Image (tube, rainbow, N blue to C red):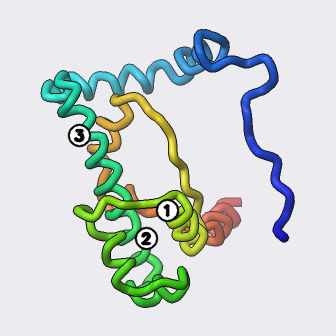
Amino acid sequence: MGPSITKISPAKGETYANGSLGDLARRSNKSATIDRTSLLSERSEWEDAEYRHAYAEAAVEQGIAWQIRVNRQARGLSQQNLAQQLGTRQSAISRLEDPEHGSYSLPTLLRIAKSFDCALMVRFVPYSWLAWEAQHLGPADLYAAPYSEEIHHDALRK
């Protein structure tokens, strides 16, 4: 059995609807929100809700596929190597790296993150964040350093 972890949750008394968490979200990093929001004006096609939702879905499917490939390659792993680490077949990794495949489960993504020794975050975000992310899709933007690399880099700065 693994270590006991306390789950992160809002403090008692905080609410999700019209309460303090919403107020906090509106106040947090206002200038960054303004900068990201200005990117929306460049995407007039997003005014169509159907288009906007389809774009968001495609961004998730393609973005995950690209991130898996970039992070696998950056770690010097072949699809076969990663498949062995995950206890699956190379063809499964090939499907995960195919932007057209688009079928991911959280348990699978968590196993991949564990194999890469990085974190997985799944969040609801405003469209302004998606617009910003759409401009940051290069390999350096998609690479998630393993914990050991972050600690080593941090130690060098001290």
Mark 1 lies on a secondary structure that is loop
Tell me the quadrant of the picture where the N terminus can be found.
Answer: bottom right
First-in-chain label (2 vs 1): 2
Q: Amino acid at mark 3?
A: Ala
- In the drawing, does residue 24 fall left or right of residue 33? right
First-in-chain label (3 vs 1): 3
From the image, tell me which residue sits under label 3. Answer: 54
Residue 144: image tag = 1
First-in-chain label (2 vs 3): 3
Mark 2 lies on a secondary structure that is helix
Residue at 74% over, 41% down? 8
Residue 154 placed where, x, y %?
66, 61
Q: Residues within 10 Å of mark 1 (few under 14, many from 20)?
A: many
Q: Amino acid at mark 1?
A: Ala
Count of marks, rendered view: 3
Residue 122 at least partly seen: yes
Of residues 108 and 144, the one drawn nearer to the viewer in this rendering: 108
Of residues 131 and 94, the one drawn nearer to the viewer in this rendering: 94
Residue 71: image tag = 2
Q: Answer above or below: position of 27 versus 157.
A: above
| Residue farthest to the left, as pictured | 45
Residue 18 placed where, x, y %?
59, 10
Please name which of the two marks, 3 or 1, marks the residue nearer to the observer.
3
